[in-house]
Amino acid sequence: MELYKPDMMELYNPDMMGKYGGMAMEKQLFFADVVGKMDWNVDMAKGEIAFGGNYVFPMQILGSFSHSSETWLWGWANSQSNLPEKLLIQANKLREYGDINKIDWLVNGQFEINRNWMHYIGHIALGMFEASGYYLGNFGAGTICLTISAKDIDQKFPNNPLSIFTVFPQLISRYEVNHKESFVNYLIQKKYEIEKNGNEILGKNGEYKVKASFDNMGRMTELKNIE
């Protein structure tokens, strides 16, 4: 059977990234700063990942990327590794989402893909399951993609209202999303009150106010802080 090979336009689902991308990217940037380049190790029996001697967190396995064949393998399709079902809850939920919404790459167990795509699925899963972060662990022959639940990190997450100005430009430069819809979702997740006026969005969070302007295609043309 010929291996499934999706094109990039099929992979980058704008609805999924538009809904979860902003907040997921902000949380991931913070998570990456915390764990840095620490050594990592997983304990499949306990369902945990350890970073250095400082952190041990519950994890979920999404899948893995083979460096030799350059293919992605979902955790639920990895029959050879006998992965514990308790570590595949999120991967299976993504599969169910793909079944319901007719998204082929979520229901095909293995397929060819660029390794950078793992960041995309990591962001999607982080946002959808409200994880603390995702991690790509290189184990030599491949890279495993995990999501992590870490109360200690969640409690330290600053959620700065003004982080929008650094995070959102990164999101729209990296992924194909509807700028306007993605921005509104991001503001809502950051507890902003929203006012819509045509192609302008005003967000208010306490003393902080932000204003974004968009063209008729929904693309952001300006983002600024209002004193």
Image: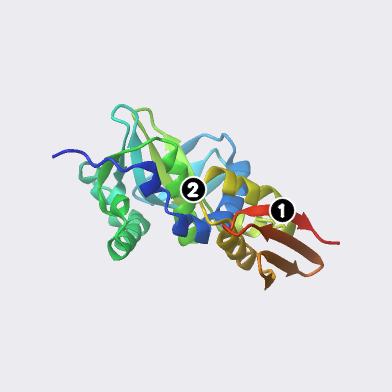
Can residue 148 be seen at all in this image of the molecule? no
Residue 155 image label: none
Q: Spatial distance from mark 1 to mark 2, Cα to Cα? A: 30 Å
Q: Nearer the viewer, mark 1 or mark 2?
A: 1
Q: Position of residue 63 (x, y in %)?
A: 34, 45
**Residue 107 versus residue 60: which sits nearer the camera?**
107
- The residue to which callout 1 is attached is 222
For the residue labelled by badge 2, is the local secondary structure a helix, a strand or a loop? strand
Q: Position of residue 210 (x, y in %)?
A: 75, 61
Q: Amino acid at mark 2?
A: Tyr
Between discs 1 and 2, the one toward the N terminus: 2
**Residue 11 versus residue 130: which sits nearer the camera?**
11
Placement of the C terminus among the 4 image quadrants: bottom right
- The residue to which callout 2 is attached is 134
Can residue 186 be seen at all in this image of the molecule? yes
Q: Position of residue 12 (x, y in %)?
A: 42, 49
Q: Residue at x 69, y 69 (%)?
A: 192
